[in-house]
Image (cartoon, grey):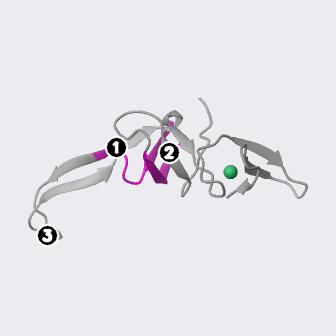
């Protein structure tokens, strides 16, 4: 299974489907499923019964999971959809860098 290249709060651009070309923030990463949930993307309408907290019932709109391979990270520095490279830091750990502008992403 491929490792997910994005993480929570990353801004991503959608590559496929109805939401192609849209951008949104990652709300949740599901590594086991290889999926991510992106704010405002793949909205699913769910009808709910009336409850105490929501006496009217009605329709809840919620972002649905999409395959992580269908999103591209958007660099916060150059604002371009980009690939990332990982650089090993002298102090230990890895830093993600934009392949276009070379700035650190995090
Ligand atoms: Zn960049």
For numbered disc 2, what is the local secondary structure? Answer: strand
Q: CA distance from mark 3 to mark 2?
A: 38 Å
Bin the neighbour count of mark 1 within 10 Å (Cα to Cα): few under 14, some 14-19, many 20 and up.
some
In the picture, measured across the screen, residue 103 lies left or right of residue 68, that is right
Residue on which the image places disc 2: 13
Camera-nearest residue between 37 and 84: 84
| Upstream in sequence: badge 2 or badge 1 | 2
Residue on which the image places disc 3: 52
Tell whether label 1 touches label 2 (CB within 8 Å).
Answer: no
In the picture, measured across the screen, residue 18 lies left or right of residue 105, that is left
Image quadrant where residue 105 sits: bottom right
| Upstream in sequence: badge 3 or badge 2 | 2
Q: Quadrant of the C terminus?
A: bottom right
The residue sitting at 42% across, 46% down in the picture is 22
The residue sitting at 62% across, 42% down in the picture is 5
Residue on which the image places disc 1: 42
**Which region shows up in magenta?**
22-43
Q: Is residue 36 magenta?
A: yes
Q: How many marks?
A: 3
- Give the foreground label among 3 and 2: 2
Q: CA distance from mark 2 to mark 1?
A: 13 Å
The spot of residue 78 in percent (x, y) is: 65, 54
- Residue found at the far top of this picture: 1
């Amino acid at each position: 299974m491929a490792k997910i290249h994005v993480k929570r709060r990353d801004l991503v651009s959608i590559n496929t489907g109805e939401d192609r070309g849209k951008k949104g923030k990652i709300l949740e990463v599901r590594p086991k499923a290889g999926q991510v949930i992106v704010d405002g993307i793949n909205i699913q309408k769910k009808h709910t019964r009336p409850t105490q907290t929501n006496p009217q019932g009605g329709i809840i709109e919620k972002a649905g999971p999409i395959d992580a391979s269908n999103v591209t990270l958007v660099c916060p520095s150059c604002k371009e959809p980009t690939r990332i490279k990982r650089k090993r830091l002298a102090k230990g750990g890895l830093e993600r860098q934009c392949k276009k502008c070379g700035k650190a992403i995090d």
